[in-house]
Amino acid sequence: MSKRWFASLFVMVLTLGSATAQSGTELRFCLWSEPKTFNPLLVQDDSSETVRYLTGGVLVRLNRQTQQLEPELATAWKTSRDGRTITFALRQNVKFSDGTAFSAEDVAHTIQQMMDPNLHSPTGDSFRSGEGKVETKVLWADKIAIFFPAPIAGLDKLFDQVAIMSAKSPKKERAVLGPYYVAEYKAGSHLNLERNPNYWKHDSSGHQLPYIDSVRLDIQQNRDIEILRLLRGEIHLVNSLNAEYFDKVIAEKPALVHDAGPSMDSEQIWFNQVASAPLPAYKKAWFGSTNFRRAISESINREDLSRVVFRGHARPATGPVSPGNQFWFNTRLQPHPFDQKAAMKRLEQDGFRVQNGALRDKDGNAVEFSVVTNAGNKYRERMATMIQQDLAGIGIKLHVVTLDFPSLIERIARTFNYEACLLGAVNIGLDPSEQMNIWLSSAENHQWNPGQKAPETAWEAEIDRLMRAQASELNEKKRKEYFDRVQEIAWEQEPFIYLVNRNALSAISTSVQNAHPVVLRPQVFWNIDRLSLGSEVAQK
Amino acid sequence: MRQLAKHVAIILVTVLLGGLLGATLIRFAPGYGVDEQELDARLSAGSIEALRRASAPDENLFLFYGHYLKRMVHGDLGTSRTLQRPIAQLLRERLPDTMKSVGLGALLGWALGLALAIPVAMSRAWLVDALASVMAGILLCIPVAVLALLFVLTRAPARLVIALIVFPKVFRYARNLLVRSAALPHVLTARAKGLSHAGVFVWHVLPLAGAQLLALAGVSVSLAFGASIPVEVVCDLPGIGQLAWKAALGRDLYLLINLTMMVAVVTLAANSASDLLGGAFGRSEA
Amino acid sequence: MKWVRRAAIIFLLAVALACVFAERLAPADYAHQFRDIPDAPASAAHWLGTDDLGRDRFSRVLHGTRISLLLAPAAALIASFLAAVVGGTAGFVGGALERAVMSGTDLFLSLPWFFLLITVRALMPLNVSPITSVIITFALLGCLGWAAAARVVCADARSLKNSDFALQARASGSSGYRLLRHHLLPNLRPVLYAQFWISIPVFILTEANLGILGLGVSEPLPSWGSLLRELEGYSSVTSNAWQFAPLLLFISVVSCFHLVVLDRELPA
């Protein structure tokens, strides 16, 4: 009798055990490379960024859908009039994943770490507005003020990237405030994230978030395999697809794919305008001429690039801001039209003429130059080849050279031994301040002519002035006016010849609910804590 | 014994030289000391400067190599810059996997190559020869990436791709060597005297081609190693080949020197072994 | 057997002729992009369809064949010649020289030549014409592709030197040169043929992969290697069967080439 009783108890325990195991839901997707760091302040690569997004708790979060700032660990915040101080009121009774209590001390600790000049934190760099130290003052356990040496425009939005670390926890950066924590990491293979038992957020019915119990991130460099696994149902989502994969998936499982419209990323060509570059003087004269750059731009058929290379999943680009950026895009501007007659007129103004089918400058030099791009990127290679044919239409001979990334960077950033370069720009944030290092003539990433001691052209001086003005202005409307003007100058002068904005393409399994893919990174799992798998919402 | 010691000494010198030459090639190639992250627009000038300093140690090449060897003697292989992890650990994790696929690939490639080359040489069946040649030809013509992709699509074990890369080369050399040996006058005589196929092969053809086949075996190890790079990259196998590719693209000096020396050790060991065996072969025949 | 060889000869001749008259035969310029019909299937206007940029695939195959079929065998010849010289000399002379040369060969096999290629690219001007670039690439491949064969040639030469018939010839008063010319060199052929035959397809494919370093054939010039690169990647494999035409031609030509040219030279 008692034996049987024990047996049935044993069976019951077993079934219970398996039932709880079944209810553990797991979301699976792939990282394309090994995360380089788990320290949220040192994040630079995409994989680390994904881990930070899934695990890090932030004071404020930019809603990727509405593109508006929302409270998270801070319930309220205020930027001072001079734009140098920001005060946060913090959420109470919040704990880190390891149970340590969260307080203003942790915020102060994180900020101090981040601004440590020896750490070289990329996140911290966006807060560096001027010489001097950043001070923090804990006003109360749930209130903190941060003082910056110079005004920072769009200061509050920058905190979207700052994952708060614990000042006291012995687990250091492994103690987190986000929806998940890293439970297991096997180098070269995968990461397992488990739900943070102390996550503060609840849904409207009072249920603790996130809905999904764990996230498994497989490190998978080969995109082909990733797509195959998606089609086989082994992973739930692909955050960013290229146009070919998109068409491939749509052919087999049309319900999976989403096209969210033009993303923040752009593709562009620029000419080397560095005075000391090892190029013949006549070529430097071409590249320095606004007429020449405009003519090249007008000779490129951007519609064809979008249609043929990106199979319609891209849009001709206008300038440094994508139309996907709702607030900052200058709606008065249009992409440069494809008009080779207008281009020839501009070239004639500079003394160029066509002779036996070849374009020659006023001294008789045939117009011939090379464009370098990174090898292995099919889309850039194809764009370059199409531009080659477009430019042949006005008698220009273009050589396309693909180089591996380090060689390319050495040419465009060190030796300046190149003529034109085709690359893409990735914009993570929306705010123009994040483009400071591109537009300031003294900056290292001012790629057509970096690190100028003083602006070499009047229009670059004007851009410098406008960028600085927008950076120290707190009135958003005024900032927009300044930055609109920058976009107009960029459109007129075309130091970068913007080609296309790729669309944000993604794929999500139909079993994932509440997914609303958007153009901002991370396109699919931006609302990770509200995603759910199949039926478990109903269950809970 | 003395011969063995001599071989070991030669290997040691060659490996050290290999490390130095490899380091030289890497140091003077463009893109050394460049980090992709330099293009990150968020970074301040100070951070870019720090990044540049970190990716290129400003040291004279010989001094650098000297220091490197000194540390190696103490068991420290350095740290990979791109992966931010100790190299010894990386090698420990990845080497067994690659050894397995290279070993298996080379072995299977050889088995298949010889299985086809021997009957072709002995029976001179024209059709078998033509078919085997065409098969070898097809495998040589298909890009590795396509071959690997086919394996991935059919969920076949990806390491077998290495066998298909090694096979055509082994087959072609072995077939030509064996056909020639089988056609030498004294082999023909033996055959005319009525010796069986197997007898002719074992007593007359093999001794003539044995040393060459052994040399080929030594070389095929480096062939298989070379093949492991594209296969592991395409099939996403976390092995040495994939590591080498990442290291090359990232100009990861320490990692590359270690890998160069490791490949040199394996190549030299395989070839020396084949030399020693081949030498024994030659003497016993004479 | 004869008829197969004859058919192969006819096929190769047809391919060769098609390449010589590529300009006449091709329905369109190999570089011209018909942008309204990218990735088109075969049609009367485009016999093998068009590629991802709308270029006529048949024209590209014809021009690509011309380049690859001229240059790859030339590079294979360089590699086989180097293998013969290095391996043959070491094997015949033997002793310390052999050991030194073979250690050097092993070293050569294990060095990261990737970086040499990158350096060569850096030394070349960016505005180099596609054809110059491809010639340099094949020359480099020829110069780097000998080492594995040299080892086998060396072993072969060593064992030939010690073989019965070489000893006999020496005993009957053959001079060193006569021995080399009439007995040893002809017998080294099988290994060198193997090397030659393997190198051709390998070089053709490697050339395409060197595009990553800015070497090889640059746009818009086609080569077999670059045509075959279309097949790499899951998204392209199943979409358009006409993409496989270059691969089929490549395999047929290499196989026929082997049937006609190479096997004849081996003792049958």
Image (cartoon, coloured by chain):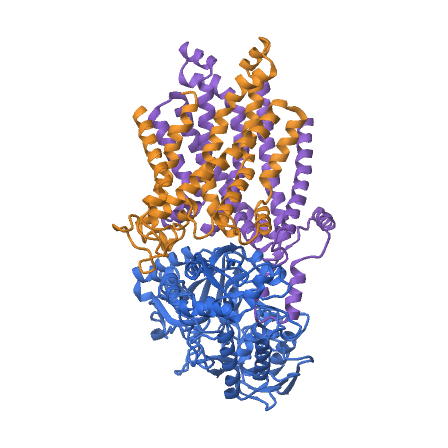
Q: Is residue A508 above or below residue C173?
A: below
Check the image and report above or below for C130 versus A360: above
- Residue A243 vertical position relative to residue C229 in the rendered view, above or below: below
x and y, in percent, of residue C62 in the image: 36, 44
Q: What residue is drawn where x is 60% and y is 36%?
A: C106
Count of numbered circles on the image: 0
**Chain B image colour:** purple
Quarter holding the C terminus of chain C is top left
The residue under the point 56% across, 72% down is A438
x and y percentages locating residue A298 in the rendered image: 43, 69
> x, y (%) of residue C52?
36, 56
Q: Quadrant of residue A523?
A: bottom left
Is residue A360 visible in the rendered image? The answer is: yes
Query: Which quadrant does the N terminus of chain C fall into?
Result: top left
In the rendered image, the vertical position of residue C26 relative to residue A349, given as above or below: above
Q: Colour of chain C?
A: orange
Query: A289 or B182, which is in the foreground?
Result: A289
Look at the image and tell me whether residue B163 can be seen: no
Q: Is residue C48 left or right of residue A344?
A: left
Please tell me which residue lies in front, B147 or A336. Answer: A336
Q: Which chain is blue?
A: A
